[in-house]
Image: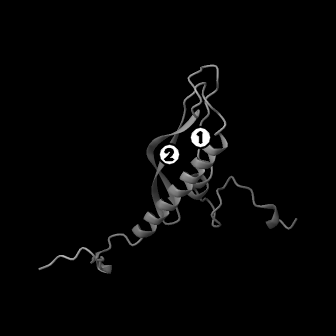
Amino acid sequence: MNEDSSIVHLRQPNEIDDPLALLRSGARRLLEQAIEAEVEAFLASKRDLKLADGRDRLVRHGHGPERVIQTGIGPVEVQRLKVRDRAADPASERIRFSSLGAAATLGATDDKFGRPAADPVPARHLGR
C-alpha cells in the first residue's frame, strides 16, 4: 500500500485523555509569545547601553527553567527567557529583567473578575 504523507490522522474524541490539554497548550504558546514580546521591548528600551567595545550591554541569554502559572484552565508550564547584563565592571549596578506583564498578570487570579488580590479596583468602577 502507498503511504501518502499528506494525510493527517486526527485523534478520535474518545482518545483524548485531558480535554483541556489543547487549551493549555494554546495558553502556553500565548504566554510564551507575550513574554517574548516583553523581553524584546525591554532590550529595545536599553539598546543604547553599550560596552566599551561597542557591543550591546544587555543580551538574550537562553531560557531559564519552566515556571508553573496558574490559569483559569489549570496550571500551565511556561519557559522563561533570560537576559544577561554583560557589564563586568563591579562598580556598575547589574540590570535585571523581571517579567511584570504577561506571566505575572495572567498567572495569578484571586478574585472572580480575574484580578490579582493586590490590584486596586479601577477608578472608573468606583463611580468617580
Horizontal relation, residue 54 to residue 15: left or right: right
Camera-nearest residue between 82 and 98: 82
Q: Residue at x 47, y 62 (%)?
A: 74
x, y percentage for residue 102? 59, 55
Q: Residue 3: name its quadrant.
A: bottom left
- Amino acid type of disc 2? Leu
Question: In the rendering, which numbered label is found on residue 60?
Answer: none
- On-image quarter of the N terminus: bottom left
Q: Which residue position holds label 1?
A: 97
Q: Which residue position holds label 2?
A: 81
User: In this view, which residue lies farthest toward the front?
Assistant: 54
- On-image quarter of the C terminus: bottom right
Q: Residue at x 49, y 66 (%)?
A: 73
Describe the element under mark 1 as helix, strand or loop: loop
Contact (Cβ within 8 Å) of mark 1 with mark 2: yes
Q: Say above or below: 101 vs 3.
A: above
Q: Say above or below: 120 vs 53.
A: below
Q: Residue 53: name its quadrant.
A: top right
Q: Say above or below: 19 vs 122.
A: below
Camera-nearest residue between 25 and 17: 25
Describe the element under mark 2 as helix, strand or loop: strand
